Image (cartoon, grey):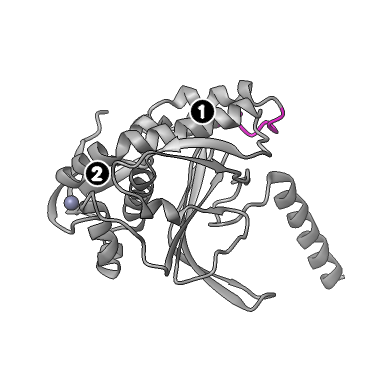
């Protein structure tokens, strides 16, 4: 069966109605066109806990993504930011490989920071659907004017290393931490080798991801070197910002079952 490469709909960035093209999230050049690549990480990272067994069947042949952007937005943003983003992802992947999946030091990244963060914002547009642009017109300008700089202080972007072969995307979600009596509003995109959180007028739901919002303060042609110490966070469940690993999830499930049993006895 061949899959139609076009669909009619509303572009998630500019809002125009018409033909949508398939937007790879993350861009195809950033490891999103190589199902095999994902499986290879098992060899690179020896102590991975074996959750890659079923990965082959899960990787979509078109790569991850959806029909979310008009051709113009897709082509423009891809041309302006795509390579810089792929390069950043590639450097992160090299760090993970070099450190055998357990980077604990600062590693230097040489990147076009403004282009990288703009591609990340484009990915959030795609994963949040066409309603997001109407609430955040300043972000539309931020990505459609390639020279535009700065994020407003209420919007922060964080990143972390993600080794899990499962990907996770959530539109804007609200999470209530009952113990801390605090609510969080954020969106998350997690893929190999990095995951991203965007907070919207909210504290970050987990303190470990590193704030890279300052990438937005550089010029389009600025290429900079940064030392970054990013945490490796497990992405095992489909709940946004849930960084429990498989053992923790299973242990908590077991504990809940026992608690229920005690209650009913
Ligand atoms: Zn568009």
- Farthest residue, direction bottom: 181
Q: Is residue 54 above or below residue 247?
A: above
Number of numbered discs visible in the structure rendering: 2
In the displayed structure, does residue 140 sit left or right of residue 248?
A: left
Quadrant in which the N terminus appears:
top left
Label 1 – label 2 distance at C-alpha: 25 Å
SS of the residue under disc 1: helix
In the displayed structure, does residue 249 sit left or right of residue 26?
A: right
Q: Residue at x 49, y 31 (%)?
A: 91
Dots 1 and 2: beta carbons under 8 Å? no
Highlighted magenta segment, given as a residue range = 47-54
**Mark 1: C-beta under 8 Å from nearest atom of ligand 1:** no
Based on the picture, tell me whether residue 130 belongs to the magenta stretch.
Answer: no
Q: Residue at x 68, y 39 (%)?
A: 104
Residue that mark 2 sits on: 77
Q: Earlier in the sequence, mark 1 or mark 2?
A: 1
**Which mark's residue is nearer the viewer, 1 or 2?**
2
Q: Residue at x 69, y 24 (%)?
A: 46
Q: Position of residue 252 (x, y in %)?
A: 75, 56
Which secondary structure is most common in the magenta stretch? loop
Q: Which mark is residue 237?
A: none
């Amino acid at each position: 069966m061949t899959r139609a490469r076009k669909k009619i709909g509303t572009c998630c960035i500019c809002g125009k109605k018409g033909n949508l093209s398939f937007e790879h999230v993350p861009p195809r050049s950033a490891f999103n066109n190589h199902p095999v690549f994902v499986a290879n990480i098992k060899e690179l990272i020896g102590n991975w806990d074996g959750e890659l067994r079923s990965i082959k069947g899960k990787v979509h042949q078109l790569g991850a993504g959806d029909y979310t952007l008009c051709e113009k937005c897709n082509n423009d943003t891809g041309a302006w930011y795509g390579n810089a983003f792929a390069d950043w992802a590639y450097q992160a992947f090299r760090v993970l490989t070099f450190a055998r999946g357990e980077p604990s030091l600062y590693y230097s990244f040489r990147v076009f920071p403004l282009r990288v963060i703009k591609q990340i914002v484009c990915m959030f547009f795609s994963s949040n659907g066409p309603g997001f642009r109407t609430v955040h017109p300043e972000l539309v300008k931020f990505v459609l004017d390639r020279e535009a700089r700065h994020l407003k202080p209420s919007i922060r972007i964080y990143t972390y290393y993600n080794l899990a072969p499962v990907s996770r995307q959530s539109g804007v979600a609200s999470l209530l931490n009952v113990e801390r009596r605090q609510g969080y509003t954020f969106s998350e995109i997690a893929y190999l080798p990095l995951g991203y959180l965007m907070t919207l007028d909210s504290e970050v739901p987990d303190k470990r991801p590193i704030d890279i919002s300052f990438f937005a303060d550089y010029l389009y042609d600025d290429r900079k070197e940064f030392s970054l110490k990013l945490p490796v966070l497990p992405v095992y469940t489909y709940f946004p910002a849930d960084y429990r690993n498989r053992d923790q999830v299973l242990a908590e499930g077991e504990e809940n079952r026992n608690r229920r049993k005690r209650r009913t006895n």
